[in-house]
Amino acid sequence: MATVSLSELLGSTVYDASGVASGRVREVALTPQEDRSRVSVLIIKTQAGNRVLPLSSVSAINGGIRASTAAAEWASADGSEGLLLLSRDLLDQQVIDVHGRKVVRVNDVDLAEQRTNGNVELRLTQVDVGLPGAVRRLLQGVVSPSVVRKLQSRLPQRTIRWEFVNLIEPDPLRRVKLRITHEKLEDLHPADLAEIMESLSAAERQGIIASLDEEMAGKVLAELDERLTRQIVEKLDPEKAADILEEMAPDAAAELLSDLPKETSEELLDELPGQEAEDVRELLSFDRSTAGGMMNTEFVVLGETATREEVLEWMRTQDLNLDSLDSVVLLDSTARFSGIVTVARLLMAAPEQSMGELRLEPLLSVPADTEEKEVFELFDKYNLRTLTVVDDSQRPIGTIAVDDVVSRLVEK
């Protein structure tokens, strides 16, 4: 299967069915709604204006583009709605390399040539983000193609398969028309996507967040710099922003809202369902530099007399966030805090063992007004992964995870 670059096609002479030179290639286009990789049309610059030549009417591309139809039959190129123009929309544009988890700039595009019913078919296979593509474009038309190919063969190759390329399209209407999705981005770790977004423009960041599902958008916002998060949320539709907040852990939602202007924060809180809004308001009432300002109010609570088998059976019926479930909090008969059990201990215990038998020692908890410095010291002294926050009656009201501590320390 032969390969041709976009830069080699652009400017090529186009001959109609009679062999007359009728124009030059101005653009190469895909119709993403039909096929994300197959070239559908060429835009030809002629003396009569730009014309559309369907690729199904191209019989050869070597030594010039050979059309199987007369130039008079080529329709006028009135617009590009619904088309992805490879020169305009890809060359020199930033795209996200999903596989490499980074933003790159496109220097050229590689197309695979094959035959279908006697006509040429071109498929976009990869984008060139290295020196060969830049050199090819720089020397195209200046020296012979054979010299260009010889030069680029000596340069280190840097290409990305088209399936790993995620286009950055900030315009929501155009994104819908082209059916550009960010499904691939949702396979990235939120921290990687947040890092990628930091190198994009404000409009591009806005476009990506708006197109992600609410759960992923919330995770990414929690990883972003406070300034960028504030910029993004303030420009989101309040309903969309509230949907994202609803998917976030209460502590993450509270932290995000605390960085927003009070008017904006209150507007978003009014959009949240009752219980979620109440949890977040409670967290916002605590000083951010205390245990209450660090804790998460979503945690698993169990009675200390429950057996390991009863607990596992109950947990299977619950919608728990298994990725962050490290331990469970225990209550005594008066609903007071009586310890924690790690998930590892729980899984290794005998079916009949009670939670009380499995709890960790020493029994540690802190009131909500405990200064963060003391919290840090407890985590360090006892190598904690979780610390429970209690009220004046010794009832658990939240937990602080080790990743909350690490994040807070990194901020400092």
Image: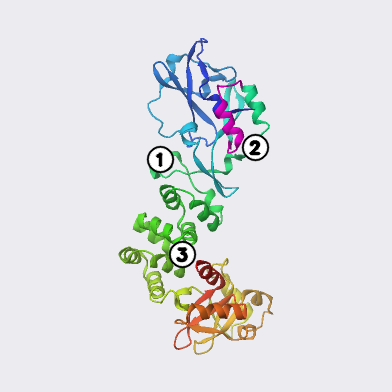
- Please name the residue that numbered disc 1 is placed on: 174
Helix, strand or loop under label 1: helix
Left or right? Give the position of 295 relative to 378.
left
Earlier sequence position, callout 3 versus callout 2: 2
Work out whether residue 1 can be spotted.
no
**How many dots with numbers?**
3
**In which image quadrant can residue 329 be found?**
bottom right
Residue 98's place in the image compared with 107, above or below, is: below
Residue 237 at least partly seen: yes
Residue range in magenta is: 127-144
> Which kind of residue does numbered mark 3 sit on?
Met
**Nearer the viewer's eye, disc 3 or disc 2?**
2
Quadrant of the image containing the N terminus? top right
Q: Which mark is residue 312?
A: none
Q: Give the colour scheme shown.
A: rainbow
Which residue position is annotated with label 3? 248
Identified at 65% across, 28% down, the residue is 151
Which residue is labeled 2 in the image? 157
Mark 3 vs mark 2, CA separation in Å:
42 Å
Q: Residues within 10 Å of mark 2 (few under 14, many from 20)?
A: some
Q: Nearer the viewer, residue 39 or 378?
A: 378
**Proximity of marks 3 and 2: CB atoms separated by less than 8 Å:** no
Q: Secondary structure at mark 3?
A: loop
Residue at coordinates 48% horizontally, 59% vertically from top-left?
A: 224
Task: Work out whether residue 398 or residue 138 is closer to the camera in this orientation and state it.
Answer: 138
- In the rendering, at what x and y percent does residue 235 appear? 36, 54
Specify the amino acid type for callout 1. Answer: Arg
